[in-house]
Amino acid sequence: MSDSDNAIARLSAGEIAAKVKSKAISAADVTEAALRRMEALEPHIHAFSVPTPEVARAAAAAVDAKVAAGEDPGPLAGAPIGIKDLVATKGIVTAMGSKLYEGWAPEEDDIVVERLKAAGAVILGKTNVPEFGYSGVGHNPLGMTTRNPWNLALTPGGSSAGSGASVASGVSPFAIGSDGGGSIRIPSAHSGLYGMKASMGRVPLYPGCRDERYPGVSSWESLEHIGPMSRTVADSALMLSVIAAGPDMRDRYSIPGPEFDWNEAAKPGSLKGLRVAYSSDWGYAPVDPEVRRVVGEAVKAFEQDLGCHVEEAHPGWEDPGPHFWTLVAAESDLTGMRKMIAGREADVSPHLVALIQKEWTGAEFTDAKTVRKAVVNKMWRFMQNYDVLLTPTLAVPPFPVHMQGPEMIEGRMVDSGRWLSFTFPLNLTGQPAASIPAGFTKDGLPVGLQIIGRHLDDAMVLRVSAAFEAARPWANVWPPLVRDLGL
């Protein structure tokens, strides 16, 4: 890797687009630098399930041709990007971490991919996921295990695992993630990144969650979001300005474009007098002591550095965790998936087989929906008193690969999904929520702070994120792997 390659890797997506438009650098040069960096890092992190160098080169050439012709190449001109392998890409293998879809290539792009291409982004490839995204880690039956650049023995979090590892190590300045229970925010927290789940409906989804032809992905319709993961708040806002540009008839949940400008909302400004709630544990969740320490220190910045009024308070619901996966099952194509795995159970992740084959009852489904309504009602009433709510993003720091989650937190035995206590409730409510780097454990592992806005108040989440980023910058802190490889 050359010094110029490393310099390109340290540019934001916004900086790359500006330099490409001004002809200070070509999209082709940016792409080749990203591909060389991918080649150097992939043997260590396994972030990309399907690299697409020729696709990337063709897209970069098209951007450069537009620039040369005096045409507008788009707001993302030449910016490299990874696409999560649950998001459909026309003609590019989208196996979704499953042997059941090994070698399958969709016949159409997801809406977000259409919009990214039109905006001049350069797709480097598909980023790795657990099977169909049904867990918060980064291993799957196809054999690829994504590693955390901060410690290769640990998971980067998932299900947008490859997106997290690739952006954290500088292969691209941002990547697409998806989030049905935290899967943008989880790897952002574990990988030291910013990741935002915009309000439900801001980013249209199709065919993922919308097309009965694909049982493995036709699910999670009222829970799933697609969104950005990046090294800066501004780059996430830039991507949202493209992918959240208004509704699409293919997504019945999509809503009109916002009354604010995404990029303007992400500019740092005063938060003086803002009413901030801080829930360290929802009132019931076990939290690793190091996470409590790091997030607690980060929250102090809102009062001491940013002039906010901070109050520790909890929304007051009972733990909805036992009902979350019931809702997932209710929104999954159980009939299609049961047919798909019949006779091939040994090829499928055991936890997924158990969910698909369980004999769910109507009472379980209706009880889960009732709990969801109660969480929504508790939250809107609570948020009437606050502008934003802060929590840890996750209950634990990164843990070893090939686990679904730790079974002991803060000295308490827990089920392997309890570490996700802070993320999935925001999929139940559909509120905007972001994970932002809060700091590091004593072992040098990243910890995330979750910033939650009121219903549809995405602009406030970006505003608060940008102010915290300015007070506690992190983008120039790189994982040990990057330093060790001289990148």
Image (cartoon, rainbow, N blue to C red):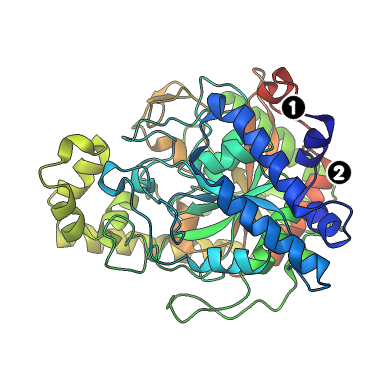
* Disc sitting over residue 487 in the figure: 1
Q: 439 above or below 359? A: above
Q: Nearer the viewer, mark 2 or mark 1?
A: 1
Q: Position of residue 186 (x, y in %)?
A: 53, 42
Which amino acid, mark 1? Leu
Judging by the rendered image, the residue that carries numbered circle 2 is 305
Q: 377 above or below 419? A: below
When asked about the image quadrant of residue 92, the answer is bottom left
Which amino acid, mark 2? Asp
Q: Is tag 2's residue or tag 1's residue first in the polypeptide sequence?
A: 2
Q: 428 above or below 137? A: below
Query: Which quadrant is the C terminus positioned in?
Result: top right
Q: CA distance from mark 2 to mark 1?
A: 33 Å
Q: Label 1, secondary structure: give it.
A: loop
When asked about the image quadrant of residue 279, the answer is top right
Front residue of 282/52: it is 52
Front residue of 376/162: it is 162
Q: Please state if 479 lies on the left or on the right of 205 as rendered.
A: right
Q: Position of residue 199 (x, y in %)?
A: 56, 66
Q: Please state if 60 lies on the left or on the right of 100 as rendered.
A: right
Classed neighbour count for the residue bearing mark 1: other residues with Cα under 10 Å, few (<14), some (14–19), many (≥20):
many
Q: Position of residue 467 (x, y in %)?
A: 81, 51
Q: Position of residue 25 (x, y in %)?
A: 84, 51
User: Residue drawn at (71%, 60%), measured in percent from left and top?
Assistant: 237
Front residue of 199/428: it is 199
Classed neighbour count for the residue bearing mark 2: other residues with Cα under 10 Å, few (<14), some (14–19), many (≥20):
some
Q: 148 above or below 381? A: above
